[in-house]
Amino acid sequence: MSSLLVDRIGLLVTNDPELGEGPLGLMRDAAVLVEGERVAWVGPASQAPAVDERLDADGGCVLPGFVDSHTHLVFAGDRAEEFAARMSGQPYAAGGIRTTVAATRAASDVQLAANARRLAAEALAAGTTTLEVKSGYGLTVSDEERSLRAAATVTGETTFLGAHVVPPEYADRPDEYVALVAGPMLDACAPHARWADVFCERGAFDPDATRHILEAAAAKGLGLRLHANQLGPGPGVRLAVELGAASVDHCTYLDAHDFDALSASSTVATLLPGAEFSTRSPYPDARRLLDAGVTVALASDCNPGSSYTTSLPFCIALAVREMGMTCEEAVWAATAGGARALRRTDIGTLTTGTQADLLVLDASSYVHLAYRPGVPMISTVLRLGRREGRRGAE
Ligand SMILES: [Zn+2]
Protein backbone atom coordinates (compact mmCIF):
# COMPACT_ATOMS: atom_id res chain seq x y z
CA MET A 1 0.00 0.00 0.00
CA SER A 2 1.34 3.45 -0.91
CA SER A 3 2.23 5.84 1.92
CA LEU A 4 2.24 9.62 1.70
CA LEU A 5 3.17 12.04 4.46
CA VAL A 6 1.52 15.46 4.31
CA ASP A 7 4.21 17.35 6.16
CA ARG A 8 5.02 20.86 7.42
CA ILE A 9 1.36 21.69 8.10
CA GLY A 10 1.25 25.08 9.87
CA LEU A 11 -2.33 24.63 11.11
CA LEU A 12 -4.33 21.41 10.82
CA VAL A 13 -8.12 21.26 11.11
CA THR A 14 -8.98 17.70 12.20
CA ASN A 15 -12.61 18.33 13.32
CA ASP A 16 -11.79 15.90 16.12
CA PRO A 17 -11.95 17.76 19.45
CA GLU A 18 -10.11 14.89 21.14
CA LEU A 19 -7.16 15.33 18.82
CA GLY A 20 -6.67 19.08 19.04
CA GLU A 21 -7.93 22.35 20.34
CA GLY A 22 -11.55 23.58 20.14
CA PRO A 23 -14.41 22.20 18.03
CA LEU A 24 -12.16 22.14 14.94
CA GLY A 25 -9.59 20.00 16.79
CA LEU A 26 -6.78 22.35 15.73
CA MET A 27 -3.14 21.22 15.77
CA ARG A 28 -0.10 23.37 14.97
CA ASP A 29 3.06 22.09 13.23
CA ALA A 30 1.36 18.86 12.32
CA ALA A 31 1.61 16.04 9.79
CA VAL A 32 -0.87 13.55 8.35
CA LEU A 33 0.12 10.06 7.20
CA VAL A 34 -1.97 8.66 4.37
CA GLU A 35 -1.92 4.95 3.55
CA GLY A 36 -3.88 4.00 0.46
CA GLU A 37 -7.26 5.69 0.68
CA ARG A 38 -7.22 6.28 4.44
CA VAL A 39 -5.65 8.48 7.08
CA ALA A 40 -3.24 6.25 9.02
CA TRP A 41 -1.88 8.74 11.55
CA VAL A 42 -2.24 12.40 12.60
CA GLY A 43 0.19 14.11 14.96
CA PRO A 44 3.02 16.56 15.55
CA ALA A 45 5.35 16.91 12.55
CA SER A 46 8.30 16.21 14.86
CA GLN A 47 6.96 12.69 15.51
CA ALA A 48 6.03 11.88 11.92
CA PRO A 49 7.18 8.49 10.61
CA ALA A 50 9.62 8.36 7.70
CA VAL A 51 7.95 7.46 4.40
CA ASP A 52 8.98 7.51 0.76
CA GLU A 53 6.63 10.18 -0.50
CA ARG A 54 6.06 13.59 1.07
CA LEU A 55 3.66 16.39 0.27
CA ASP A 56 5.05 19.65 1.65
CA ALA A 57 2.26 21.90 2.97
CA ASP A 58 4.85 24.69 3.29
CA GLY A 59 3.43 25.95 6.59
CA GLY A 60 -0.09 26.29 5.15
CA CYS A 61 -3.40 25.25 6.66
CA VAL A 62 -4.74 21.75 5.94
CA LEU A 63 -8.37 20.81 6.42
CA PRO A 64 -10.75 17.97 5.51
CA GLY A 65 -12.16 18.13 1.97
CA PHE A 66 -15.49 19.94 1.76
CA VAL A 67 -18.64 17.81 1.88
CA ASP A 68 -21.31 19.38 -0.32
CA SER A 69 -24.48 17.65 0.84
CA HIS A 70 -26.92 19.39 -1.53
CA THR A 71 -26.46 19.78 -5.30
CA HIS A 72 -28.50 19.44 -8.46
CA LEU A 73 -25.74 18.67 -10.98
CA VAL A 74 -27.80 16.65 -13.46
CA PHE A 75 -29.39 19.06 -15.94
CA ALA A 76 -28.90 20.65 -19.34
CA GLY A 77 -28.83 24.28 -20.43
CA ASP A 78 -28.43 27.35 -18.25
CA ARG A 79 -30.65 30.19 -17.07
CA ALA A 80 -28.31 33.15 -17.29
CA GLU A 81 -31.04 35.30 -18.82
CA GLU A 82 -33.42 34.51 -15.96
CA PHE A 83 -30.67 35.51 -13.50
CA ALA A 84 -30.05 38.76 -15.31
CA ALA A 85 -33.78 39.52 -15.37
CA ARG A 86 -34.09 38.76 -11.66
CA MET A 87 -31.16 41.02 -10.84
CA SER A 88 -32.94 43.76 -12.75
CA GLY A 89 -35.91 43.46 -10.42
CA GLN A 90 -38.13 40.44 -11.19
CA PRO A 91 -38.85 38.06 -8.26
CA TYR A 92 -37.86 34.36 -8.17
CA ALA A 93 -40.66 31.86 -8.89
CA ALA A 94 -40.30 28.09 -8.35
CA GLY A 95 -41.73 27.50 -11.86
CA GLY A 96 -38.43 28.59 -13.44
CA ILE A 97 -37.39 24.98 -12.83
CA ARG A 98 -39.59 24.00 -15.80
CA THR A 99 -37.18 25.69 -18.24
CA THR A 100 -34.44 23.31 -17.09
CA VAL A 101 -36.82 20.34 -17.20
CA ALA A 102 -37.45 20.92 -20.92
CA ALA A 103 -33.70 21.18 -21.67
CA THR A 104 -32.91 18.10 -19.53
CA ARG A 105 -35.54 15.93 -21.24
CA ALA A 106 -34.10 16.93 -24.61
CA ALA A 107 -30.51 16.06 -23.62
CA SER A 108 -28.89 12.66 -24.21
CA ASP A 109 -27.59 10.43 -21.40
CA VAL A 110 -24.06 11.24 -22.56
CA GLN A 111 -24.70 14.99 -22.37
CA LEU A 112 -26.24 14.75 -18.87
CA ALA A 113 -23.34 12.69 -17.52
CA ALA A 114 -20.76 14.96 -19.19
CA ASN A 115 -22.34 18.09 -17.66
CA ALA A 116 -22.45 16.47 -14.21
CA ARG A 117 -18.79 15.41 -14.54
CA ARG A 118 -17.74 18.91 -15.63
CA LEU A 119 -19.41 20.44 -12.58
CA ALA A 120 -18.05 17.75 -10.24
CA ALA A 121 -14.54 18.52 -11.53
CA GLU A 122 -15.15 22.23 -10.96
CA ALA A 123 -16.31 21.46 -7.39
CA LEU A 124 -13.28 19.26 -6.76
CA ALA A 125 -10.94 22.06 -7.83
CA ALA A 126 -12.71 24.25 -5.26
CA GLY A 127 -12.08 21.63 -2.57
CA THR A 128 -15.25 19.54 -2.59
CA THR A 129 -14.25 15.90 -2.19
CA THR A 130 -17.76 14.51 -1.54
CA LEU A 131 -20.91 15.59 -3.38
CA GLU A 132 -24.55 14.69 -2.98
CA VAL A 133 -26.33 14.89 -6.35
CA LYS A 134 -30.10 14.97 -6.90
CA SER A 135 -32.29 14.12 -9.85
CA GLY A 136 -35.32 16.37 -10.32
CA TYR A 137 -35.15 17.88 -13.79
CA GLY A 138 -36.49 14.82 -15.64
CA LEU A 139 -39.88 14.40 -13.93
CA THR A 140 -40.88 11.35 -15.97
CA VAL A 141 -40.11 7.78 -14.92
CA SER A 142 -37.42 7.32 -17.57
CA ASP A 143 -35.93 10.84 -17.30
CA GLU A 144 -35.63 10.60 -13.52
CA GLU A 145 -34.08 7.14 -13.75
CA ARG A 146 -31.49 8.24 -16.32
CA SER A 147 -30.79 11.39 -14.28
CA LEU A 148 -29.89 9.16 -11.34
CA ARG A 149 -27.68 7.01 -13.55
CA ALA A 150 -25.86 10.21 -14.60
CA ALA A 151 -25.58 11.25 -10.94
CA ALA A 152 -24.10 7.86 -10.07
CA THR A 153 -21.21 8.53 -12.48
CA VAL A 154 -19.96 11.26 -10.10
CA THR A 155 -21.03 10.12 -6.62
CA GLY A 156 -22.48 7.38 -4.45
CA GLU A 157 -24.59 10.00 -2.65
CA THR A 158 -27.48 10.07 -5.13
CA THR A 159 -30.91 11.48 -4.29
CA PHE A 160 -34.26 10.87 -5.99
CA LEU A 161 -36.06 14.22 -6.33
CA GLY A 162 -38.94 13.36 -8.62
CA ALA A 163 -40.97 15.70 -6.36
CA HIS A 164 -39.02 18.81 -7.35
CA VAL A 165 -41.91 20.54 -9.13
CA VAL A 166 -45.14 19.33 -10.76
CA PRO A 167 -44.31 19.13 -14.48
CA PRO A 168 -46.46 21.15 -16.91
CA GLU A 169 -48.28 18.10 -18.30
CA TYR A 170 -49.65 17.39 -14.78
CA ALA A 171 -50.42 21.04 -13.92
CA ASP A 172 -54.18 20.45 -13.65
CA ARG A 173 -53.89 17.04 -11.92
CA PRO A 174 -51.10 17.29 -9.35
CA ASP A 175 -52.49 14.37 -7.29
CA GLU A 176 -51.82 12.04 -10.23
CA TYR A 177 -48.25 13.26 -10.38
CA VAL A 178 -47.78 12.57 -6.65
CA ALA A 179 -49.10 9.04 -7.20
CA LEU A 180 -46.66 8.57 -10.09
CA VAL A 181 -43.70 9.79 -7.98
CA ALA A 182 -44.59 7.58 -5.00
CA GLY A 183 -45.35 4.61 -7.26
CA PRO A 184 -43.76 3.72 -10.62
CA MET A 185 -41.17 6.52 -10.56
CA LEU A 186 -39.93 5.53 -7.11
CA ASP A 187 -39.87 1.86 -8.16
CA ALA A 188 -37.63 2.71 -11.13
CA CYS A 189 -35.40 5.15 -9.26
CA ALA A 190 -34.91 3.53 -5.85
CA PRO A 191 -32.24 1.07 -7.10
CA HIS A 192 -30.10 4.05 -8.20
CA ALA A 193 -30.61 6.29 -5.16
CA ARG A 194 -29.40 6.38 -1.57
CA TRP A 195 -31.77 9.21 -0.60
CA ALA A 196 -35.18 10.68 -1.42
CA ASP A 197 -36.02 14.37 -1.26
CA VAL A 198 -39.15 16.51 -1.76
CA PHE A 199 -39.48 20.25 -2.39
CA CYS A 200 -42.08 20.99 0.31
CA GLU A 201 -43.11 24.54 -0.44
CA ARG A 202 -46.11 26.56 -1.58
CA GLY A 203 -46.09 26.20 -5.40
CA ALA A 204 -44.33 22.81 -5.19
CA PHE A 205 -45.56 19.96 -2.89
CA ASP A 206 -47.85 20.34 0.14
CA PRO A 207 -47.24 18.51 3.46
CA ASP A 208 -49.65 15.63 2.69
CA ALA A 209 -48.00 14.90 -0.66
CA THR A 210 -44.55 15.28 0.92
CA ARG A 211 -45.37 12.81 3.68
CA HIS A 212 -46.87 10.32 1.22
CA ILE A 213 -43.81 10.37 -1.06
CA LEU A 214 -41.24 10.25 1.75
CA GLU A 215 -43.00 7.42 3.56
CA ALA A 216 -43.07 5.41 0.32
CA ALA A 217 -39.35 6.13 -0.18
CA ALA A 218 -38.50 5.12 3.40
CA ALA A 219 -40.36 1.85 2.86
CA LYS A 220 -38.00 1.22 -0.08
CA GLY A 221 -35.01 1.74 2.22
CA LEU A 222 -34.07 5.24 1.10
CA GLY A 223 -32.83 7.84 3.58
CA LEU A 224 -34.83 11.06 3.74
CA ARG A 225 -34.00 14.72 3.09
CA LEU A 226 -36.26 17.70 2.49
CA HIS A 227 -36.24 21.12 0.82
CA ALA A 228 -38.32 23.27 3.18
CA ASN A 229 -39.06 26.77 4.42
CA GLN A 230 -37.08 28.38 1.60
CA LEU A 231 -39.61 30.81 0.16
CA GLY A 232 -41.83 31.26 3.23
CA PRO A 233 -42.84 29.74 6.58
CA GLY A 234 -44.48 26.32 6.53
CA PRO A 235 -44.69 22.86 8.10
CA GLY A 236 -41.75 21.34 6.15
CA VAL A 237 -39.12 21.61 8.87
CA ARG A 238 -41.32 19.97 11.50
CA LEU A 239 -42.33 17.26 9.05
CA ALA A 240 -38.65 16.52 8.32
CA VAL A 241 -37.98 16.14 12.04
CA GLU A 242 -41.07 13.97 12.55
CA LEU A 243 -40.05 11.66 9.68
CA GLY A 244 -36.46 11.40 10.98
CA ALA A 245 -34.91 13.01 7.90
CA ALA A 246 -31.12 13.22 7.89
CA SER A 247 -31.32 16.83 6.80
CA VAL A 248 -33.78 19.62 6.13
CA ASP A 249 -32.42 22.12 3.67
CA HIS A 250 -32.83 25.90 3.22
CA CYS A 251 -34.51 26.73 6.60
CA THR A 252 -34.75 30.39 5.64
CA TYR A 253 -38.15 31.10 7.23
CA LEU A 254 -38.36 29.48 10.68
CA ASP A 255 -40.62 30.12 13.66
CA ALA A 256 -40.00 29.30 17.33
CA HIS A 257 -41.57 25.82 16.94
CA ASP A 258 -39.18 25.02 14.09
CA PHE A 259 -36.15 25.96 16.20
CA ASP A 260 -37.47 23.82 19.08
CA ALA A 261 -38.15 20.85 16.81
CA LEU A 262 -34.71 20.99 15.22
CA SER A 263 -32.84 21.44 18.47
CA ALA A 264 -34.52 18.37 19.96
CA SER A 265 -33.72 16.23 16.89
CA SER A 266 -30.81 14.67 15.03
CA THR A 267 -31.97 16.30 11.77
CA VAL A 268 -29.28 18.60 10.38
CA ALA A 269 -30.29 22.09 9.20
CA THR A 270 -28.47 22.54 5.89
CA LEU A 271 -28.15 26.18 4.88
CA LEU A 272 -27.66 27.15 1.25
CA PRO A 273 -26.58 30.80 1.16
CA GLY A 274 -25.78 30.63 -2.56
CA ALA A 275 -29.56 30.50 -3.14
CA GLU A 276 -30.26 33.62 -1.09
CA PHE A 277 -27.34 35.37 -2.78
CA SER A 278 -28.52 34.46 -6.29
CA THR A 279 -32.17 35.28 -5.64
CA ARG A 280 -31.41 38.40 -3.58
CA SER A 281 -33.40 37.00 -0.66
CA PRO A 282 -32.98 37.27 3.12
CA TYR A 283 -30.44 34.81 4.56
CA PRO A 284 -31.39 32.16 7.14
CA ASP A 285 -30.68 32.91 10.79
CA ALA A 286 -27.70 30.63 11.29
CA ARG A 287 -26.79 32.31 14.57
CA ARG A 288 -30.12 31.46 16.15
CA LEU A 289 -29.92 27.85 14.91
CA LEU A 290 -26.42 27.42 16.34
CA ASP A 291 -27.35 29.08 19.62
CA ALA A 292 -30.31 26.66 19.87
CA GLY A 293 -27.88 23.73 19.58
CA VAL A 294 -28.96 22.69 16.07
CA THR A 295 -26.37 20.92 13.89
CA VAL A 296 -25.78 23.17 10.88
CA ALA A 297 -24.30 22.21 7.50
CA LEU A 298 -23.43 24.49 4.61
CA ALA A 299 -23.93 23.33 1.02
CA SER A 300 -23.91 24.91 -2.42
CA ASP A 301 -27.38 23.95 -3.77
CA CYS A 302 -25.59 24.08 -7.14
CA ASN A 303 -28.33 24.32 -9.79
CA PRO A 304 -28.82 26.40 -12.92
CA GLY A 305 -31.75 28.44 -11.59
CA SER A 306 -31.24 29.73 -8.08
CA SER A 307 -27.59 29.03 -7.11
CA TYR A 308 -25.19 28.26 -9.92
CA THR A 309 -22.02 27.88 -7.87
CA THR A 310 -20.00 24.81 -6.93
CA SER A 311 -17.82 26.79 -4.52
CA LEU A 312 -18.07 26.00 -0.81
CA PRO A 313 -15.39 28.64 -0.05
CA PHE A 314 -17.87 31.16 -1.49
CA CYS A 315 -20.66 29.73 0.72
CA ILE A 316 -18.36 29.90 3.77
CA ALA A 317 -17.63 33.57 3.03
CA LEU A 318 -21.39 34.31 2.73
CA ALA A 319 -22.16 32.41 5.94
CA VAL A 320 -19.60 34.43 7.86
CA ARG A 321 -20.42 37.81 6.34
CA GLU A 322 -24.20 37.50 6.06
CA MET A 323 -25.44 34.81 8.46
CA GLY A 324 -23.64 35.48 11.72
CA MET A 325 -21.49 32.34 11.66
CA THR A 326 -17.93 32.48 12.96
CA CYS A 327 -15.17 31.36 10.58
CA GLU A 328 -14.76 28.28 12.76
CA GLU A 329 -18.47 27.40 12.60
CA ALA A 330 -18.65 27.91 8.84
CA VAL A 331 -15.63 25.69 8.13
CA TRP A 332 -17.03 22.99 10.43
CA ALA A 333 -20.44 23.23 8.72
CA ALA A 334 -18.91 22.78 5.23
CA THR A 335 -16.90 19.73 6.29
CA ALA A 336 -18.08 17.80 9.38
CA GLY A 337 -21.57 19.35 9.11
CA GLY A 338 -21.96 18.12 5.53
CA ALA A 339 -20.84 14.67 6.64
CA ARG A 340 -23.50 14.65 9.39
CA ALA A 341 -26.13 15.69 6.82
CA LEU A 342 -25.17 12.58 4.82
CA ARG A 343 -24.93 10.44 7.99
CA ARG A 344 -21.29 9.68 7.23
CA THR A 345 -18.57 9.30 9.86
CA ASP A 346 -15.75 8.44 7.44
CA ILE A 347 -15.53 11.89 5.84
CA GLY A 348 -15.42 15.52 7.06
CA THR A 349 -12.87 14.65 9.76
CA LEU A 350 -9.14 13.91 9.63
CA THR A 351 -8.37 11.22 12.14
CA THR A 352 -7.04 7.67 11.99
CA GLY A 353 -9.24 5.58 9.70
CA THR A 354 -11.15 8.35 7.93
CA GLN A 355 -11.09 8.80 4.17
CA ALA A 356 -7.92 10.63 3.07
CA ASP A 357 -9.78 13.64 1.63
CA LEU A 358 -7.93 16.84 2.44
CA LEU A 359 -7.09 20.31 1.20
CA VAL A 360 -3.81 22.19 1.45
CA LEU A 361 -4.30 25.96 1.51
CA ASP A 362 -1.82 28.58 0.30
CA ALA A 363 -2.73 30.39 3.53
CA SER A 364 -1.79 30.13 7.18
CA SER A 365 -5.37 29.66 8.44
CA TYR A 366 -8.85 28.48 7.44
CA VAL A 367 -9.94 32.04 8.31
CA HIS A 368 -8.59 33.10 4.92
CA LEU A 369 -11.45 31.20 3.23
CA ALA A 370 -13.82 33.96 4.41
CA TYR A 371 -11.26 36.74 4.86
CA ARG A 372 -10.10 36.58 1.23
CA PRO A 373 -13.35 35.82 -0.63
CA GLY A 374 -13.19 34.83 -4.28
CA VAL A 375 -9.46 34.17 -4.15
CA PRO A 376 -8.31 30.68 -5.19
CA MET A 377 -6.10 29.44 -2.36
CA ILE A 378 -6.37 25.65 -2.50
CA SER A 379 -2.98 24.45 -3.70
CA THR A 380 -3.62 20.70 -3.47
CA VAL A 381 -6.63 18.43 -3.10
CA LEU A 382 -6.27 14.81 -1.98
CA ARG A 383 -9.28 12.57 -2.53
CA LEU A 384 -9.13 8.98 -1.36
CA GLY A 385 -5.39 9.56 -0.88
CA ARG A 386 -4.83 10.56 -4.50
CA ARG A 387 -3.53 13.97 -5.52
CA GLU A 388 -6.13 15.64 -7.69
CA GLY A 389 -3.82 18.14 -9.37
CA ARG A 390 -1.81 21.08 -8.17
CA ARG A 391 -2.82 24.53 -9.26
CA GLY A 392 -0.44 25.84 -11.91
CA ALA A 393 0.91 22.36 -12.66
CA GLU A 394 -1.55 21.45 -15.43
ZN1 LIG B 1 -31.97 22.33 -3.85
Image (cartoon, rainbow, N blue to C red):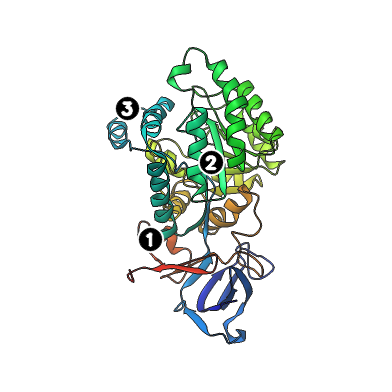
Residue type at mark 1 is Arg
Pick whichever of labels 3 and 1 is earlier in the sequence.
3
What residue sits right under mark 2 in the picture?
285
The amino acid pointed to by label 2 is Asp
Height in image: 323 above or below 105?
A: below
Circles 3 and 1, Cβ within 8 Å, touching? The answer is: no
Residue situated furthest top in the rendering:
172
Measured from the top left, where is residue 182 in percent x and y?
62, 26
User: For the residue carrying disc 3, how many other residues have a C-alpha within 10 Å: few (<14), some (14-19), or many (20+)?
Assistant: few
**What is the distance, in whole Å, between disc 3 and disc 2 at their CAs?**
24 Å
Q: Residue at x 28, y 31 (%)?
A: 85
Q: Residue at x 65, y 50 (%)?
A: 343
Of the two numbered discs 1 and 2 in the rendering, the one whose residue sits closer to the viewer: 1
For the point 50% across and 81% down, the residue is 54
Q: Quadrant of the C terminus?
A: bottom left
> Which residue is nearer to you in this view: 167 or 79?
167
